[in-house]
Amino acid sequence: MEKLNFPQFQWGDRINEQKKLIFDRVRKKNYPLTPEEWVRQHCLELLISYYQINIQKIAVERGLKINGNMKRFDIVVFTNGTTPKILVECKAPTVEITRDVVIQASQYNSKLDSEFIWLTNGITHVWMQKNEDLKYSLIEFPQKMKD
């Protein structure tokens, strides 16, 4: 798979190259190793290993009803209970992070109201944080997260 703009992670036996599968530690099963899944797994590994977020506080590819339509977010990190902290929207490395991606994540976040939004294609990372005016501003890659 393509080299991404993430720290080097040890995937060990989580990848089955013959069957093109990767084991998701959060969902506890194998998934097809698509370019978008490769990005999603890197995001999860960063959240778990670097930010030391408990796996039990992470939801992956869950449904949301938006304007009567079912949608699926990529990753949401929760604080205590059910309060969303980070919404992550993953795209394949060939998909640019455009205004349309921001709109998509904003629609999901209209239901979630997370403090942080992270948009990534594995190469480009865009982080936003809700400010005092309840609007989102671009921020640098956060060094650490607090629950």
Image (cartoon, rainbow, N blue to C red):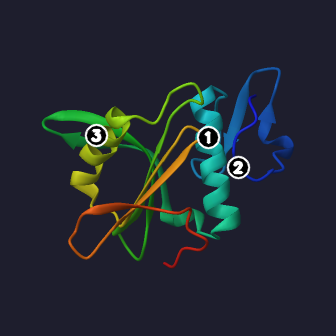
Badge 3 vs badge 2, beta-carbon distance below 8 Å: no
The answer to whether 5 is drawn above or below residue 111 in the figure is above
Type of amino acid at the residue the image marks with label 1: Gly
Rendered location of residue 49, percent (x, y)? 70, 63
User: Along the horizontal axis of the image, is 80 left or right of 111?
Assistant: right
The answer to whether 36 is drawn above or below residue 47 in the figure is above
Q: Quadrant of the N terminus?
A: top right
Q: Quadrant of residue 2?
A: top right
Residue at figure coordinates x 60%, y 50% from the top left: 43
Residue at figure coordinates x 27%, y 61% from the top left: 113
Residue at figure coordinates x 28%, y 47% from the top left: 106
Type of amino acid at the residue the image marks with label 3: Ile
Labelled disc at residue 6: 2
- Secondary element at tag 1: loop
Determine the CA span between mark 2 and mark 1: 7 Å
Determine the CA span between mark 3 and mark 2: 24 Å
- In the depicted view, which residue is nearer to us: 138 or 24? 138
Rendered location of residue 100, percent (x, y)? 32, 33
Residue behind mark 3 = 103
Q: Quadrant of residue 13?
A: top right
Type of amino acid at the residue the image marks with label 2: Phe
- Tell me if mark 2 has few (under 14), some (14-19) or many (20+) residues whose alpha carbon lies within 10 angstroms of its own: some
Q: Looking at the image, is mark 3 or mark 2 earlier in the sequence? A: 2
User: Along the horizontal axis of the image, is 57 left or right of 132?
Assistant: right
